[in-house]
Image (spheres, rainbow, N blue to C red):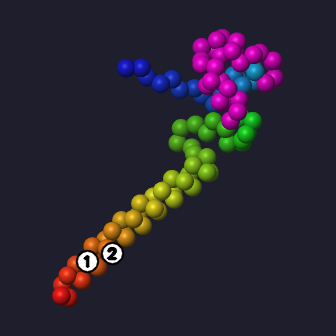
């Protein structure tokens, strides 16, 4: 079983700096750092798109991800309430006959 490697925010920022500020190519930087090219490209893209929220770390979510999680919980709760009401309506409809 292969465990997934985890990289600190500082490591990711330094890796991206190699590419963006020092002019090292992505394939060369990825080889030097022993990471896959696509991983490094993803880090560069994340930092460009949202510099403040890039690489949030363990236990920290982006605001958008937190909102999605909250909405999913709410949808699950509403579905459960709906199902209970359907069962109650069927029960009372059967009893009134």
Image height check: is 24 above or below 47?
Answer: above
Residue 76 magenta-drawn? Answer: no
Q: What is the chief secondary structure element of the magenta stretch?
A: helix
Magenta span of residues: 20-46
Whole-percent x, y for residue 35 in the image: 59, 18
| Crowd rating for badge 1 (residues with CA inside 10 Å; few <14, some 14–19, many 20+) | few
- The answer, for residue 45, to whether it is visible in the render is yes
Question: Which residue is farthest bottom?
Answer: 96
Q: Quadrant of residue 13?
A: top right
Relative image position of residue 63 (x, y in whole percent) = 62, 51
Q: Determine if the magenta segment contains residue 43.
A: yes
Mark 2 or mark 1: name the one nearer the start of the chain.
2
Q: Is residue 64 above or below residue 45?
A: below
Question: Does the image show residue 13?
Answer: no
Who's the residue at 57% across and 55% down the image? 67
Tell me: residue 86, above or below residue 50. Answer: below
- Residue under pointer 2: 85
Quadrant occupied by the N terminus: top left
Can you identify the residue that label 1 sits on? Answer: 90
Query: Which of the two residues, 75 or 63, is positioned nearer the viewer here?
Result: 75
| Distance between mark 2 and mark 1 Cα atoms | 9 Å
At horizontal 81% and vertical 18% (from top left) the residue drawn is 22
Mark 2 Cα shell of 10 Å, populated few (<14), some (14-19), many (≥20): few
Q: Quadrant of the C terminus?
A: bottom left
Q: Are marks 2 and 1 in contact (CB under 8 Å)?
A: no
């Amino acid at each position: 079983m292969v465990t997934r490697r985890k990289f600190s925010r500082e490591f990711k920022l330094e890796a991206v700096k190699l590419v963006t500020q020092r002019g090292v190519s992505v394939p060369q930087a990825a080889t030097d750092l022993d990471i896959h090219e696509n991983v490094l490209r993803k880090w560069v893209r994340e930092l460009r798109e949202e510099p403040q929220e890039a690489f949030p770390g363990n236990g920290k979510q982006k605001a958008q991800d937190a909102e999605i999680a909250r909405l999913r919980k709410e949808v699950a709760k509403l579905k459960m309430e709906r199902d209970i009401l359907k069962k109650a309506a069927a029960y009372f409809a059967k009893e009134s006959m």
